[in-house]
Image (cartoon, rainbow, N blue to C red):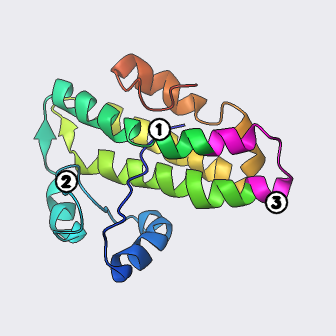
Amino acid sequence: MIRAFPSEPTCPPERATRHSRRGATVIAGMLMVGLGIAGCGGAAGATNGAAATTTVTRAVFVAKANAICGKADPALSAAAARLATHPPAAQVAALVKTTYVPSVEAQISEIRALGTPSGDQATVTGMLGLVEADLNRLKSNPALVATDVFGDFARVAHPYGLTACAPLS
């Protein structure tokens, strides 16, 4: 799976509420938090307008995107361990909804907020479109979490250099 699951234990309750609505916000097409925003400070909306026009080098983009995906390892590893116990379908669906979906949506938003390397706009847009399609399939059928659900994305992302994203695909 693509990975990034930021933990923010020191955030005020109103920020936690905002994170619980992250999926709806992402689906609505709004960008959330850029990689440069840390902790509870700063407004997520501050980077949204700039993200669409920002360009970065490919090396910087790949390094930052891999870091975003790598941040999810603890949460997604714990979720995978729970899935390894072969829980009932209802528990699988709950785990997908509460862990996998928000994590992947956050990663998509953060990677999108990085901007795109010059000349690679079509590739990056295509990769993000693939991961969004894969995520939508997972939302529709949580049992796909036990499959290579992010394989479409990985077949493009890994050769591009995003090897920390969907590492098992």
Q: Identify the residue at image location x=59%, y=43%.
A: 78
- For the residues bearing labels 3 and 1, Cβ distance under 8 angstroms: no
Residue lying furthest right in this view? 88
Which residue lies under the disc numbered 2?
51
Which residue lies under the disc numbered 3?
90
Is residue 15 visible to the viewer in this orientation of the structure? yes
At mark 2, the secondary structure is helix
Counting every numbered tag in the picture gives 3
Q: Main secondary structure of the magenta part?
A: helix
- For the residues bearing labels 1 and 2, Cβ distance under 8 angstroms: no
The amino acid pointed to by label 1 is: Asp
Which residue lies under the disc numbered 1?
73
* Alpha carbon distance from label 1 to label 2: 25 Å
**Front one among 147 and 156:** 147
The magenta stretch is: 79-92
The amino acid pointed to by label 3 is: Ala
Q: Is residue 153 magenta?
A: no
* Alpha carbon distance from label 3 to label 1: 23 Å
Q: Identify the residue at image location x=31%, y=45%.
A: 111
Q: Residues within 10 Å of mark 3 (few under 14, many from 20)?
A: few
Tell whether 29 sits left or right of 77.
left
Q: Quadrant of residue 62?
A: top left
Nearest to the eye among marks 2 and 3: give it. Answer: 3
**Front one among 90 and 104:** 90
Q: Quadrant of residue 12?
A: bottom left
At mark 1, the secondary structure is helix
Q: Identify the residue at image location x=23%, y=61%.
A: 39
Q: Residue 112 placed where, x, y %?
A: 30, 48
- For the residues bearing labels 2 and 3, Cβ distance under 8 angstroms: no
Q: Residues within 10 Å of mark 1 (few under 14, many from 20)?
A: some
Q: Identify the residue at image location x=42%, y=70%.
A: 19
